[in-house]
Amino acid sequence: MERRDFLKNSVFTTGAILAGSFTACENRIDDLLLPISQQKKRLAIAMWDFSWILRHHRYGSFENWDQILAGLAERGYNAIRMDAMPQLVAADSEGVIQEEFRCVKDSWTPALWGNDYTTTIRPRDALLEFLPLCQKYDIRVGLATWFLPHNSGRTDIFMEEGGLYRAWFETLSFLDQNGLLHDALYVDLLNEYPFWHGYDWLKKELDDRSDIKTFKLNNPEAHIQDGEKEEGEKFNPTQKAFYNNFANDLIRKLKEDFSEMDFYISLDSGMKLKNMDLSEFAALDYHIWFNHHGSIPGLSEISKRDQTIDLESIYYNMLDHWKENKKSLIEWMDNRLTTISGTAATYGIPCGNTEGWGPISWYDHPELDWNWVKESAEICIDFALKHDNYKFLCTSNFTHPQFEGMWEDVEWHRRMTDRIKSM
């Protein structure tokens, strides 16, 4: 933690010595030191999930981290969201640290994210090598986790009651001991809470509370929130109280350990914002896509990546629907982003989106192109930029080098990232 103060003092000292360079020093503070809750300028952020490590092998799209980070900087991005692999960095339940994991590829369906082949990873060594390279290219890092085992053979921590806290405490302590914690823009403690992650203990606890009568019988001392599940809701009041209390208690606990860090838990549009208590969140990272409108045909078929399907007719049918319904669809998205911004403003925190905007799943295929992905991004970025508290924005889910059709269009990325950062 002392490293942050040292860097800040060094920046101010340099600014005082070098005449005419104070503005540059101020920008450097923004780039290297300020957490997401204090960011004054918008960040163009790329979601690199766990692909950064699981595709870091010979012939992998992340084989050369230095080269790929240089390419990301060339495209104008100045932040990434990455899985820090806390579930594999932390010791096992016996206190034993495992340095190396074999992650087995168990399907030959084309992989969008993660490992395309069976591979061996060393998460601790990888962080020590990768994070300094991010510094080299002035790319801020949002530490995150999907908390997945990745067929590594690791099982214990995913069903451990304190597993998520322990994983993050040990990982952040490891980074702090190696002088790398000051680089963290934020810590996203669990992906798309409480749905899309691998923390099975949490899922089991939520499921146990789905039947209130049985849960009360098995837990007579437990606090039960009055009321039944409302129509159109995924959770009853007891489940809502549980996931809100768990999230905020976890953040408070880690804040006690790492007081200078910004913590939150990312959400997606399956979570109704009115049901989420953001009182301890440093920011609202709310993932939303046109896909979630539910009316656009063909997206579920495309996401299956089934090579026996005739994608050409599916894709053109989807485009016809988009053209015919574009006005109502973009009005829907505009309203959603306004609601997200308003919710963040209520809590006095910035908002952003590290995943969006058109499809959730897409890939390089001779009968698909990337035009709709780009068009939907341009529309949504402009909507988000209307709101001053939108401080970090992605351009899509597909800013990894394995999505060659998107990655190769350097000019488009530059145009989008310039737009994000200019306001």
Image (cartoon, rainbow, N blue to C red):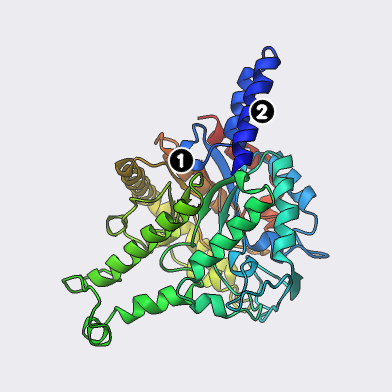
Residue 320 visible in rendering = yes
Q: Nearer the viewer, residue 228 or 421?
A: 228
| Relative to 16, 423 lies left or right | left
Instruction: Give the alpha-carbon distance from disc 1 to disc 2, as whole Å.
Output: 22 Å
Q: Nearer the viewer, residue 103 or 319?
A: 103
* Mark 1 surroundings within 10 Å by alpha-carbon count, few (fewer than 14), some (14 through 19), many (20 or more): many
The three-letter code of the residue at mark 1 reads Ser
Compare marks 1 and 2 and give the one earlier in the sequence.
Answer: 2
Residue at position x 78%, y 49% in the image: 66
The tag on residue 397 is none
Q: Which residue is mark 1?
A: 37
Residue drawn at point x = 39 percent, y = 48 percent: 330
Q: Residue furthest left?
A: 226
Say what secondary structure mark 2 lies in: helix
Quarter of the figure with residue 294: bottom left
Nearest-to-viewer mark from 1 and 2? 2
Which residue matches tag 2? Answer: 10
Say what amino acid the circle numbered 2 marks.
Answer: Ser
Residue 184 placement (x, y as % from top left): 58, 47
The answer to whether residue 145 is seen in the rendering is no
